[in-house]
């Protein structure tokens, strides 16, 4: 039995050595994968983060954005991406702080401005959100349907009364008129 085991080990050793080249590396013609090319660069962490955001993987996207920041530095694009991931995760305070930093770093970066407006809308700060969306709309020259819709929503929300009831521009106005002792008539201006 021991003889058969030694023989099997010898056969395996010969087979392994046959797959090796003279330099001691595994042959590229065998079933082994080629080596890693150190000269090639990996995929950009920002792009990986954007793909993960699109897939709904916000925590993983956040980690990819931080990896991109370690390579590129914390610029307005990465700050905006981190703030967007925090927004999707429901971390409104963090998202607002980071997006404000992104806007401070580049006051013309439309995605950061728009995302800051979204955070402000989520926090119920409709007046400030309206101003932020107006800035984004102006910088974008009105080309983005999403920013236009965000601005319209912010305008609608700022046109609410103190009690939260919506004030419609074209809604008929009603007047209550007293007729007689205890009779009232509701008149409308249609």
Image (cartoon, rainbow, N blue to C red):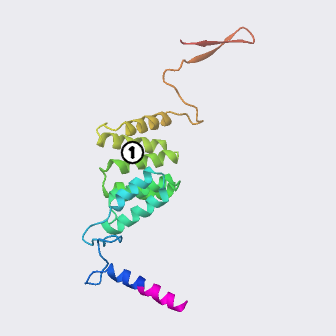
The residue furthest bottom is: 2
Please give the name of the residue rendered at 30% of the width and 41% of the height, measured from the top-left corner: 140
Give the residue drawn at x 42%, y 87%: 10
**Residue found at the far top of this picture:** 180
Image location (x, y in percent) of residue 31: 36, 70
User: Most extreme residue toward the right, as rendered?
Assistant: 182
Instruction: Report x, y in % for residue 94.
Output: 48, 59
Give the residue drawn at x 37%, y 51%: 112
| Quarter location, residue 20 | bottom left
Pick the residue in front: 84 or 65.
65
Residue under label 1, please give it.
132
Quarter location, residue 83: bottom left
Can residue 131 be seen here? yes
Q: Depth check: give the residue in front, 167 or 32.
A: 32
Compared with 61, 132 (above or below) is above
SS class, disc 1? helix
Q: How many marks?
A: 1
Is residue 100 visible in this depiction of the protein? no
The verdict on residue 3 being magenta is: yes
Residue nearest the viewer, comparing 15 with 55:
15
What is the magenta segment's predominant secondary structure? helix
Bin the neighbour count of mark 1 within 10 Å (Cα to Cα): few under 14, some 14-19, many 20 and up. many
Magenta stretch?
1-10
Which quadrant of the figure has residue 15? bottom left
Is 146 placed above or below 92 here? above
Rendered residue at 47%/90% (across/down): 6
Choose between 34 and 5: the one closer to the eye: 5
Tell me if residue 134 comes above or below residue 70 in the rendering. Answer: above
State left or right for residue 59 relative to residue 181.
Answer: left
Q: Position of residue 33 (x, y in %)?
A: 34, 70
Quadrant where the image shows the N terminus: bottom right
Where residue 118 appears, x then y in whole percent? 45, 46
């Amino acid at each position: 039995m021991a003889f058969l085991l030694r023989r099997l080990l010898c056969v395996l050793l010969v087979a392994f050595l046959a797959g090796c080249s003279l330099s001691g590396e595994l042959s590229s013609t065998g079933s082994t994968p080629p080596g890693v090319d150190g000269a090639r660069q990996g995929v950009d962490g920002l792009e990986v983060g954007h793909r993960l955001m699109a897939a709904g993987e916000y925590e993983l996207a956040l980690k990819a954005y931080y990896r991109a920041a370690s390579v590129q530095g914390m610029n307005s694009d990465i700050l905006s991406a981190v703030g967007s991931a925090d927004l999707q995760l429901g971390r409104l305070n963090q998202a607002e702080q980071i997006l404000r930093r992104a806007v401070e770093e580049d006051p013309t970066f439309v995605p950061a401005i728009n995302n800051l407006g979204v955070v402000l809308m989520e926090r119920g700060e409709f007046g400030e959100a309206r101003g932020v969306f107006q800035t984004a709309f102006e910088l974008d020259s009105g080309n983005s349907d999403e920013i236009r819709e965000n601005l319209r929503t912010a305008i609608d929300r700022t046109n609410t009364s103190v009690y939260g009831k919506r004030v419609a521009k074209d809604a008929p106005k009603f007047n209550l008129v007293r007729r007689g002792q205890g009779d009232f008539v509701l008149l409308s201006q249609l």
